[in-house]
Image: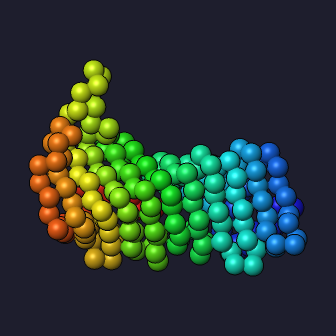
């Protein structure tokens, strides 16, 4: 049974579905391919392919990865590599659309110890794509070389943030730190 290939604590139920489920005994991996669905601790994950390394406990999700967290927030990415019960890892090409229209993206994301998130080449946009129905730039957005969130300190750090109004850069700072609050929302996956 494929479900028995992924160890879990007594209270943690995990459900996996896919078109094809393969056990690769040579590499000690379990591979799910085609319309992969995973439900774990309130997280719903879909992908084209999932590889679970039974030796290390690492999970790699590839192609059209979408994760919906316990609050219904959807994270979309090209590739995700996770370990430690999905708590630590790496996400490539992350995009998050918040229910209020806020949009956040990062070329690379590192998750560490459920507390710290590092977003490389990040874009925070409270107006979504900031393009109206007629294709014109609207609103403001912040681009940064790196954004670091630390839920332990409840602070958001920006490295080389650049404020853009109507798509035009108007302010550059070497760094900026702000208290993490409801006014500026970042992914907390």
Q: Residue at x 74, y 45 (%)?
A: 34
Q: Residue furthest top?
A: 134
Residue 173 shows in the view = yes
Question: Number of marks in the image?
Answer: 0
Going 82% across and 61% down the picture, which residue do you hit?
A: 2
In this view, the residue in front, 145 or 110, is 145
Quarter of the rendering occupied by the N terminus = bottom right
Q: Residue 36: x and y, percent? A: 70, 49
Residue nearest the viewer, comparing 47 with 135? 135
Looking at the image, residue 88 lies above or below residue 143: below
Asked whether, in this view, residue 10 is left or right of residue 138, the answer is right
The location of residue 183, given as percent across then percent down, is 21, 54
* Residue 39 shows in the view: no
**Is 132 located above or below residue 129 in the figure?**
above
Which residue occupies 41% across, 49% down? 96
| Residue at image point 11% right, 49% down | 170
Residue 99 falls left or right of residue 172: right
* Quarter of the rendering containing residue 133: top left
Q: Position of residue 140 (x, y in %)?
A: 19, 43
Compared across the picture, whether 78 is left or right of 53 comes to left
Q: Above or below — where is 84 with respect to 100?
A: below
- x, y percent for residue 45: 60, 52
14 relative position to 98: left or right = right
Q: Nearer the viewer, residue 178 or 94?
A: 94
């Amino acid at each position: 049974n494929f479900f028995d290939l992924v160890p879990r604590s007594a209270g943690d139920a995990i459900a996996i579905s896919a078109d094809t489920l393969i056990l690769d005994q040579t590499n000690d991996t379990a591979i799910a391919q085609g319309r992969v669905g995973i439900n774990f601790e309130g997280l719903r994950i879909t992908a084209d392919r999932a590889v679970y390394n039974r030796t290390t406990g690492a999970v790699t999700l590839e192609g059209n990865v979408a994760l919906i967290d316990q609050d219904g927030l959807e994270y979309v990415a090209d590739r995700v590599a996770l370990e430690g019960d999905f708590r630590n890892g790496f996400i490539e090409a992350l995009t998050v659309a918040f229910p209020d229209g806020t949009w956040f993206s990062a070329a690379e994301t590192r998750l560490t110890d459920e507390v710290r998130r590092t977003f490389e080449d990040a874009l925070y946009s409270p107006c979504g794509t900031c393009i109206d129905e007629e294709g014109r730039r609207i609103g403001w957005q912040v681009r940064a070389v790196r954004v670091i969130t630390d839920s332990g300190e409840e602070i958001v750090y920006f490295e080389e943030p650049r404020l853009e109004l109507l798509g035009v850069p108007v302010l550059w700072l070497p760094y900026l730190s702000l208290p993490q609050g409801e006014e500026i929302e970042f992914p907390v996956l």
